[in-house]
Image (cartoon, rainbow, N blue to C red):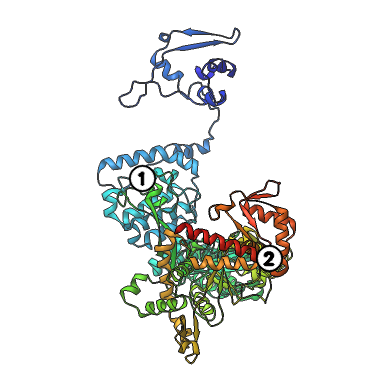
Amino acid sequence: MIIKIKLKMVYISSVLISVYLTNKDDDVFDPSMGRKQGWMFYGASKPSIPSYKLTNVFVYDPSTGLWDDEPVTNYTNRQLLELMSVRFKVPEDTNRIKDSAKGEYQTILNPPPTQYDAPDEGIVNQASTITALHDPLLNALVGIGGPQDDMPLLRALVMECLSNERAESHDEWMRVGWCLHNIGRSEEMFDLWMDFTREKAPIKWNHHRAREMPKFRRDWFTNMRMEGDGPRLSRRSLYKWARDDNRERYNQIIDADVCEYIIQNTDATHYHIAQLMKKMWNSLYVASLDSRATDWLHYDEQLNMWRRLNQGMELRLKICTDVARQINSAADKERARYASAHNDTDRERHMAKMKELHEMEGKLYSSGFNDSVMKMCATLFYEEDFVNKLNLDPFLFGCANGVLELRHRVPVTTRGPEATAFGALVNAQTPATNNPVLQADQFRERVIFRQGRPEDYVSFLAGKNHPETNAINYIPYSEYVKAKDPRLDEIQDFFKKLFPREDLRKHVLKLLASCLEGMNREQLYYFFIGVGSNGKSKLVTLMRLVFGDYQTSLQATVFTRKRPESGAANPDIMAIKGRRFIYSQEPDHQEPLNTSRMKQMSGEDMIEARGLFRDQEKFKVMGKMFMMCNRLPPINSMDNGTWRRIRVIPFESRFEESDHPDLIAKKANFYPRDNSLDDKLMNWREPFLSYLVHLYETEYIPQGLQPEPAIVKQESDRYKADYDAFAKFRSERIREGVSKYPELVSDKITLKEILKAYNRWIVTSGAKKMDLRELEHRCDEAFGDSRGTGVYKYIRVFLDEEDLEEFDKQHEEENTNEEA
């Protein structure tokens, strides 16, 4: 057989030497063709193409190193089928099955086919055939395991609690499938999904889902929810759906399950009570531990968020209330069984169990016992790295009534709601790189609002500033427009007064809307600049009231002082973790900005920090940074990396009392102060959030922050000029560029001459003096690298202001004459 012939690469090389290939011989010849895999099935062919056929047989003699031809007619088709089969000369399996295991072995080899009701006989036969062929192999590959112990409970929750709408809606139906698949990729889970479909949506099942069931089964074990597609729907979501859809039946199922579990499995030990509590509330409570502390969190279903618990007191209280009630219910059940027992043996057994349960309940009222139970609960409820998962998704924004998904990818076109069950819907949430139905350019990003779920890992809420304000709801902007809500006009009027320039006003609103997502894509640091009574603080107050948990203030000293020592506690830095809008007040007078710290904070870099009595953490700053100033702080660093990040947003309006002279004179950009503005800001919270979401979706997603207003660039350049000694010297003593000054085409200047002019200028400028190395570096950046020669072309340097003014005057006259 050909796969037994040892094809030496030396012979392959001799064959390929005359082909003049650029690839190596190892790349051209695939050794698996001769050693690892079998031939194509002999006689197979594609439609309308001749079948595979043997044309030559070569026999290699290892002793002589020669090849001989052998007639093809020496082999019959039957012999060729055997010789070219992957099973040719497979070693005999010498393993023997124990007599005690023969029955189980035969059951695995010949499982009973899973039957499904279908609209016609052909579909039933097809499903049965697929099941019979695949069940043993699939169960062996993925493990017959899965949540075997909880399977009756999960089936009851799915079949008895989930609503029909979750089967009728294609999106919800797929989410149920994803959830069950993530709980356990087993045959039992797939059967549960199909049973749910058939019972809850019989019309759709009979119409087409039953017909596609073999495809769903195939995709269940191969294509469904591959790695890297974001947070997974899990058991927590299934329990939440069951509670939401039918809370009464859910409580009945859980209580019955817990009651039987107590009778069968629970003893009066710390471990068993903690295990019982995990069974009762595993989807709602989590313990997060580090070397110094234990954080307890609870999922609040009303607010769709994870809420921190103070030392787990809420869960601890449940030991002597809810847990005790469940154990008492189990004792009552045993009492009923005792009363209905038919013999003394059963009565004694039930009586002993009743006493055991009452003794167990009595221990739950002991503080020392509960302390030990809580310690054991911390071990059982522990989820690794849970706290670091909170608010990590930059495109989720929590509100009181749900979650905003800011960049949900939706297909522009589809081929019907059911045609791409495992294609479009999966890839609508992930990059569509391998989807044959929809390509990447057929998706667009949009904002959707949906119900929250535990797997969102959201612990922040918009508008929540405890204890000042509660969380706010999200209402679509179109609803406010439709209702002609007067608050929208008030908000527009406020911003028109705050930013009289239309382009600046639109830019700032889009900038504020961009803070909804947890990214600083532009890697910029923003200064709000303006004298007092110009609305800076009111704008920040509005953002604080709207963003709630997603905003925080940061001490200005973080950006002006040196970095804290390694390992030191810095809770102020920990406070910005996960925040989207981060603002600082003006630093002390003439205190310079620490540019390395500023660049780290605004560049989406990983930073290290530690809270008080906590472990060191690493996290990425997710928010945009703003500093409110009456005067811009000094900056001593002149590198491009600093000034590339800085943007200055001027506040040009003034809000004064009605008797202010400038207001009486109707001076531009002067407005009367509104003493009721604080109350209005509180009333604007929800409509302003909706307006920002509208701007985010319609303007920021397609355009980003472009175009940037000219006034922002001018103010930023002016800031740079005020603290950039070289830029000021360049403006006051140098003229450059043949495009603007053709007379400079033959001019050359040396670094020595530039230094002479600079030293004379620095005496009267009052600017900080640069050393020679820094001056040369700045000249190379501005005029082109001199490559060590110290000579720069097309520039002219003036020793005093009079010479420069004379040059400018002469140049202006020449331009005037040319135009005439």
Viewer-nearest residue: 471 or 442:
442
In the rendering, at what x and y percent does residue 228 appear? 50, 50
- Bin the neighbour count of mark 1 within 10 Å (Cα to Cα): few under 14, some 14-19, many 20 and up: some
| Nearer the observer, 799 or 311 | 799
Q: Residues within 10 Å of mark 2 (few under 14, many from 20)?
A: some
Work out how far the residue at label 1 is from the one at label 2, CA to CA, in angstroms: 56 Å
Given residues 234 and 575, the one toward you in this image is 575
Q: Amino acid at mark 1?
A: Val
Residue linked to disc 2: 636
Q: Is residue 405 left or right of residue 168?
A: right
Q: Residue at x 47, y 48 (%)?
A: 226
Residue 136 can be seen, yes or no: yes
Q: Quadrant of the C terminus?
A: bottom left
- Badge 1 vs badge 2, beta-carbon distance below 8 Å: no
Residue 656 percent across, percent down from the top left: 50, 87
Number of numbered discs overlaid on the protein picture: 2
- Among the two numbered marks 1 and 2 on one chain, the one whose residue lies closer to the N terminus: 1
- The image position of residue 124, as x and y in percent, is 30, 42
The kind of secondary structure element at disc 1 is loop
Amino acid at circle 2 = Asn
For label 1, the residue is 437
Q: Is residue 240 left or right of residue 757?
A: left
Quarter-wise, where is residue 6 in the image? top right
